[in-house]
Image (cartoon, rainbow, N blue to C red):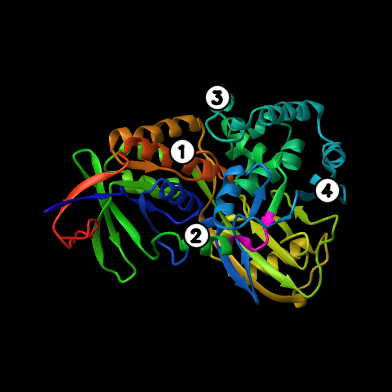
Amino acid sequence: MTEIERHPRCAVVGGGISGIAAAHFLRLRHFDVEILEQDDSLGGRVGSARLGNRTIDLGGKNIGHKYAVFRAFAASLGHCDYEPFGINTSRVREGRIVTLDSSRRWRSTIDFFRDCPKADVLRFAHLCARVLLRDRNRYLGSAFFNSLARRLDDAPLGPRFSPHFRNAVLRPMWVRMNGAEPDEVYAGNIGTNLGMWLDSYDQLRGGMAALLSDFARTMPVRLSSRVDALIVRNGRIAGLCVTDSDGKTSTRHYDAVVLATPASVSACLIRDALPKTAALLDQVRYFPVAVVVAEYKREIFSETVRALTFGPEQPLSNAGAYGIDDRHIVRYTFSGRAARPLIEQRVTAEALLDTAENILNRHIGVRRNERRAFVARTFDPGLTAYAPHHERVLEAIDAVPHSIGGLHLTGDYVRGASIEACLRAARETAAQIVDASPRRQRRSTSPGEHPIEDIASH
C-alpha cells in the first residue's frame, strides 16, 4: 500500500449558470470537480439554440456594467469582447409609445414617470437610492431589505402602490424578471429587481454559447445524467446515486456536493434528510416562461424603439429586438398570469408566435409572411419570484452544511436571479467548501488503483 495525495472531489449538480460558476470557482481552488446535468447540454436558463445559420441565446444574455464577477469569469475563458445593449423599453400610453432609454436615462425617465402619482415616484425613488448607495442591496439577504421584509412581507408589495404605477412601472419589471404579477412579489426581494433596472447592459459578441463551449473544456461534464438521491453516511455527504444517459444507475463517491438546481429540485433531493429545509425551499416560487425568437426579412424595431411591454391582459409580456443591430430578429417573451395557461397547455411554438405577432402588430407592424425562421423554448421551472420572508430560506440554506457535512446549496434563489447574482452566490458557496475542507486529502491505495474510481451500485 502507498499513500498518495489527492484533491478533494466535488460534484456540482446542475449545469446552469449557478452550477457552472460553482464548478469554476472550485476548480480555481484545485478541487477535482465534475458537473452532472440532466439535460443534453449546458446552460440551463442561459442556453442557446440554432436560428437559421446562427446560434442565438434563448435565456439570459444581457451583461450589466455592474457584473464584475461575471466579467472576470468570462475574461478567464478569453471572452472580453462586448457590444453595447443598454436599456430600451417602451409602453403604450394613450395611444403613444413612451420609451425609457438608458442612453438618455434622466430625460426619458422623467417622461416615463410623468403621469405617475408623486407619492409612488418618491417611494420608488427611495428604494432606488438604497440600491445605488449600497451595492449589497442589489442582492438577496441584505440587511436593509431583510428589515423591510420583517415589516412588510406578510402581504405582497404591489398593492402598496397605486394601480397606475403598479401596471405602468412595476409590473413590466416584475413580470419580465420574475414572471410574477404585482400580487406575487414581496418587499424584501425588490432590491434584486432594482439592481438590474438601474444597471446598463452589454452583450457578449460571441453570445453565451461560445462561452459555455469554452468552459466545458475545462472540466468533466456528464450530460443526460440524473441525480436520484444523496448518499449520506455518519452525518456527512458520501456520494450520489446517479442514472446516466445509458440508463444505468451507479453510486459515485464525492467529498462534497453542490446542489446548483432550482429550489424545487433541491427540495426533492434533500427532503428525506432535511424535511424542514425542504419545506422552506418549497416556498420559493417559480413561474413558467416561454421564449420565441423569430428572424424576419426586414427590421421590425427601430433605433429609438427596440422593445415594447404589454399589460396584464396579454399573454405576451415583452417583445424586443435581439440586439442593437439585430432589429430584424425579435425575441418574444410569454410570462405572467395570462401566459401560464398557454404554457401549461403546451401550445405549439408556431401558435405562440402567431399570438405574439398579432399582439405586436397593433403597435408595430409585423407580418407572418415576413418570417424567415424561428425557434422556441419553454422554461419550467422558469423565473423565480423568491419567497415572502426570504431571509428564512437563506438562513436554512446556510445551516445545511452544519447538518450534513459537505453538502451545499446554491442557485438563483440565494442572491438573486441575475447572472451576476448567481455567480456571487456560487463564489460564496465555493469559499465555504474551501474553508471546510483540508487543502489536500490523503488516501491509502494499492498500486494501480485509481483514487476516484466509481463505487458500483448494489
Kind of residue at disc 4: Thr
Closer to viewer: mark 1 or mark 4: 1
Most foreground residue, 291 or 436: 436
Q: CA distance from mark 4 to mark 3?
A: 34 Å
The local secondary structure at tag 2 comes to helix
Q: Which residue is mark 4?
A: 99
Closer to viewer: mark 1 or mark 2: 2
Q: Which residues are magenta?
A: 203-208
The local secondary structure at tag 1 comes to helix
Q: Earlier in the sequence, mark 1 or mark 3?
A: 3
Q: CA distance from mark 4 to mark 2?
A: 37 Å
Residue 385 included in the magenta stretch of the image: no
Q: Which residue is mark 2?
A: 215
Residue 344 coordinates in the image, percent (x, y): 53, 59
Q: Residues within 10 Å of mark 4 (few under 14, many from 20)?
A: many
Residue 398 coordinates in the image, percent (x, y): 40, 33
438 to the left or right of 297: left
Q: Which residue is mark 1?
A: 428
Q: CA distance from mark 1 to mark 2?
A: 20 Å
Kind of residue at disc 1: Glu
Residue at horizontal 38 percent and vertical 53 percent from the top? 13
Q: Which residue is mark 3?
A: 143
259 to the left or right of 304: left
Kind of residue at disc 2: Phe
